[in-house]
Image (tube, rainbow, N blue to C red):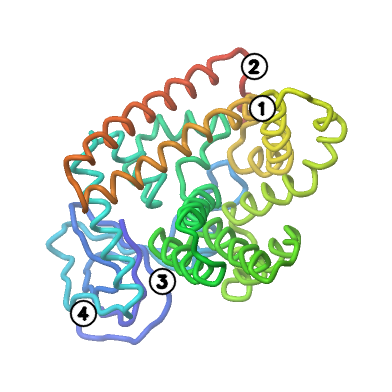
Amino acid sequence: MFDIKAQRVTANTCWWNCSGALRVTVNGAVSPEYGDLVEASGNMVLPQGYCNGRGASVRERLRQKGILAVLRVPHARRVRIIKAARYPGPVCACMAAKRSFLRIIRGRLPPVAAAIMEAMVLGDKSGVPRSVYKDMIRSGTVHILVVSGFNVGIVSGACALLLKVMRLNRTIRLAVIVPAMVFYCVMTGASPPVVRATVMGIFLFSSWYVRRDPSIPQALSLSAFSILVFSPRQLYNASFQLSFAAVAGISLLSPAIGKVVRLDRISLRPLRWVAAMGVVSLSAWLGTAGFIAYYFRIISPVTVIANILIPAIASLITLCGAGLVIFGFLCPYAAISFASVSEFLILLMLRFNTLLINIPGAYWSFP
């Protein structure tokens, strides 16, 4: 299954120029790249109009993404690549890098671990087993399996730390970090959470560069405006709503909850760190609980605990994935160590997630 931007439709001996997006489903394996000129033949139908219990029909959700019709192709032989992709330079570099990274990950990790690593690092969650995806929804940690602000924060933070260790000045650091964030955003598909985190990151790093105190509400508003000005339909997208609700909940509720539990009076630093993580997790859950209940028909109190420990493991997985990719190019023998550690951490994360969702009352599903 892939999406194309339609240019012309042919039926019998007649043809019409057209516009709009089209979802193509193929009975077989095809591998068109982004930007290819593709010809496909099959039966064109409207998206299905039934509801699956999440409030909006399949047709309406596809329409929000700009997809107006579905082309059902009975065999892969009916899909033909007429002309190879011709990208602008930066987009070409992003897509070429992503393909190279995918080859390294798939060549070093077993299938399930590779699929999870691809989802967490590169935003390609097509290979994640359905059972794993459902278990992460039950624990409220499904955001780990998609590239989001969490991943952008790790990438930008790692770049900032590395450049600071190299003792480079602020101007050079900003000139490296901002392009790296934009590159990662484009490479992973520029989904609403990634765009939101990228715009917020650029705003915050720019504030740091001019020595001004950063404002989370201003950065959040600017990123929302940046997305909606190009695609107003994103306002009704679940990913957009969850992403901004989580950040808004953290920025607005965390200070108040921190005062209630008196974080500043906890003397032991490790205990204060755990308590602060719990406050952030609780704030994010309160901000998104209504949307999650509406879209996924589930309430997960265990999310507060899960989002204290699982993101810490996920951070290590992301860093190991970055090391695996980098050393896969520079020193393939060293990449073996990163692959082994990554596989262990992924197994640890899945086992811990299974342990949490098996706690009585961890989550409640409703029709």
Residue 102, image x and y in percent?
Answer: 26, 51
Q: Quadrant of residue 95?
A: bottom left
Question: Residue flagged by tag 2: what amino acid is it?
Answer: Gly
Question: Residue flagged by tag 3: what amino acid is it?
Answer: Ala
Determine if residue 252 is in view: yes
Q: Could you tell which of marks 4 and 3 lies nearer the N-terminus?
A: 4
Residue furthest out toward the left: 77
At x 49%, y 70%, the residue is 172
At x 57%, y 53%, the residue is 239
Comparing labels 4 and 1, the label whose residue is closer to the camera:
1
Q: Quadrant of residue 197?
A: bottom right
Q: How far apart, in angstroms, are the residues tagged by discs 2 and 1?
A: 23 Å
Q: Could you tell which of marks 4 and 1 lies nearer the N-terminus?
A: 4
Residue 265, image x and y in percent?
Answer: 84, 27
On the rendered image, what quadrant is the C terminus found in?
A: top right
- Whether pointer 2 and pointer 4 mark residues with C-beta atoms closer than 8 Å, the reply is no
Q: Relative to 231, does residue 52 appear above or below in the rendering?
A: above
Residue 35, image x and y in percent?
Answer: 29, 73
* Crowd band around label 3 with a 10 angstrom C-alpha radius: few (<14), some (14–19), many (20+): some
Q: Find residue 19 and name its label.
A: none
Q: Nearer the viewer, residue 227 or 343?
A: 343
For disc 2, the marked residue is: 361
Determine if residue 59 is in view: no
Q: Find residue 274 and name its label.
A: 1
Q: How far apart, in angstroms, are the residues tagged by discs 3 and 1?
A: 46 Å
Question: Under tag 2, what secondary structure?
Answer: loop
Q: How far apart, in angstroms, are the residues tagged by discs 3 and 2?
A: 43 Å
For disc 4, the marked residue is: 12
Q: Find residue 21 and name its label.
A: 3
